[in-house]
Image: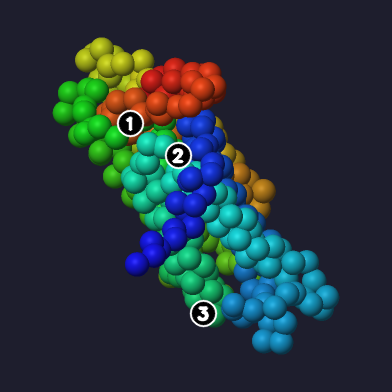
């Protein structure tokens, strides 16, 4: 009986990407996940949420925006098209991870998880349009994008380490404090979506868009309270890491998180006291992605899985892989 051909195996038989290429492809997924969040925010902030009033086509009679729809249709349609760019980059990361030898199934699984998250969020985006920018669906759309960013960051991190059983690099109570930081930041993001859903940027100026019936100032204050909690946990974690003489990488990651939080705090206060100008709100959304990435990097740096395995490569391959090995060790 003839053997079934696997397209990914055919690629692996003919192409052997370097460890550095796999890491860069994984990083590209992270970058595009952030781009999707920021451009999605731009759609809302430019009142283009219903620039294409239906889905999956732009209008009932046209796949693309028509001249009568103006710039709002172009902005909304462009954001939709960026999804295909994201799919292409994730596809490249999947193929690179599959072709890399020795084969690392966790990396390919993380790549496929991103693909299915993109597909599901595309459907959620369509429901967002069909429900007239329902704020709860909009919030779900953002949270799904955040889930995609989470998986992309994990894949990026895992691409630089091995597949050994995870081992703690700090005492278990410190790891638990890291978990508390992740949970607090998750709540911060959740409350942030409620702030968005009750705020003045509904996403479309031509239609009376339903908003979450909460006082925007009160929910914003709750959001600020969670910011203080996250900052306090970050400072506490930094002191604890110093006290237990943790490796340099976790301490550096926590310092990076603190800097990002301070910058994001400045942007948040400028936004609040200037009645949420569109450019500042967009910057705040970009900052929220950076905060979440920094928190994940802190948490992931508290444990290690050994060094990534390398090939018993043919002649000339060792020279190509050598520059990657210090990078893999230093990023654990």
Question: Could you tell me which residue is drawn at 54 percent across and 41 percent down?
Answer: 15
Mark 2 crowd level (few <14, some 14–19, many ≥20, 10 Å Cα): many
Question: Could you tell me which residue is drawn at 37 percent across and 36 percent down?
Answer: 102
Q: Is residue 3 left or right of residue 60?
A: left
- Residue 173 pos. (x, y %): 16, 28
Mark 3 crowd level (few <14, some 14–19, many ≥20, 10 Å Cα): some
For the residue labelled by badge 1, is the local secondary structure a helix, a strand or a loop? loop
- Residue 295 pos. (x, y %): 39, 36
Residue 90 visible within the image:
no
Residue 84 visible within the image:
yes
Residue at the spot of label 3: 131
Q: Earlier in the sequence, mark 1 or mark 2?
A: 2
- Residue 111 pos. (x, y %): 43, 50
Residue at the spot of label 2: 100
Q: Of circles 3 and 1, which is in front? A: 1
Q: Earlier in the sequence, mark 3 or mark 2?
A: 2
Residue at the spot of label 1: 162
For the N terminus, the image quarter is bottom left
For the C terminus, the image quarter is top left
- Disc number at residue 11? none
Q: Of circles 1 and 2, which is in front? A: 2
Question: Could you tell me which residue is drawn at 44 percent across and 46 percent down?
Answer: 98
């Amino acid at each position: 009986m003839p053997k079934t051909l696997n397209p990914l195996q055919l690629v692996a038989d003919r192409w052997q990407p370097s460890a550095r290429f796999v890491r860069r492809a994984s990083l590209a997924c992270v970058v595009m996940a952030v781009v999707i969040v920021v451009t999605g925010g731009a759609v809302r902030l430019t009142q283009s949420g219903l620039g294409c009033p239906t889905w999956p086509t732009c209008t009932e009679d046209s796949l693309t925006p028509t001249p009568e729809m103006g710039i709002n249709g172009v902005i909304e349609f462009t954001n939709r098209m960026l999804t295909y760019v994201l799919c292409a980059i994730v596809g490249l990361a999947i193929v690179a991870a599959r072709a890399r030898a020795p084969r690392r199934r966790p990396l390919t699984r993380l790549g496929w998880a991103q693909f299915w998250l993109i597909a599901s969020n595309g459907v959620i985006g369509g429901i967002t349009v069909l429900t007239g920018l329902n704020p709860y669906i909009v919030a779900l759309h953002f949270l799904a994008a955040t889930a995609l960013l989470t998986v992309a960051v994990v894949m990026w991190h895992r691409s630089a380490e091995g597949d050994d059983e995870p081992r703690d690099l700090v005492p278990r109570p410190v790891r638990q404090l890291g978990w508390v930081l992740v949970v607090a930041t998750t709540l911060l993001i959740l409350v942030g979506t409620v702030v968005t859903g009750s705020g003045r940027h509904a996403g479309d100026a031509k239609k009376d868009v339903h908003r979450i019936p909460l006082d925007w100032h009160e929910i914003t204050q709750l959001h600020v309270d969670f910011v203080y909690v996250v900052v306090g946990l970050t400072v506490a974690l930094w002191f604890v890491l110093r006290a237990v003489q943790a490796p340099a990488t976790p301490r550096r990651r926590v310092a990076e998180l603190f800097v990002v939080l301070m910058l994001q705090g400045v942007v948040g206060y400028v936004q609040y006291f200037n009645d949420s100008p569109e450019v500042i709100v967009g910057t705040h959304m970009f900052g929220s992605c950076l905060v979440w990435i920094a928190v994940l990097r802190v948490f992931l740096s508290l444990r290690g899985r050994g060094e990534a395995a390398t090939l018993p490569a043919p002649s000339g391959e060792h020279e190509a892989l050598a520059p990657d090995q210090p990078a893999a060790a230093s990023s654990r």
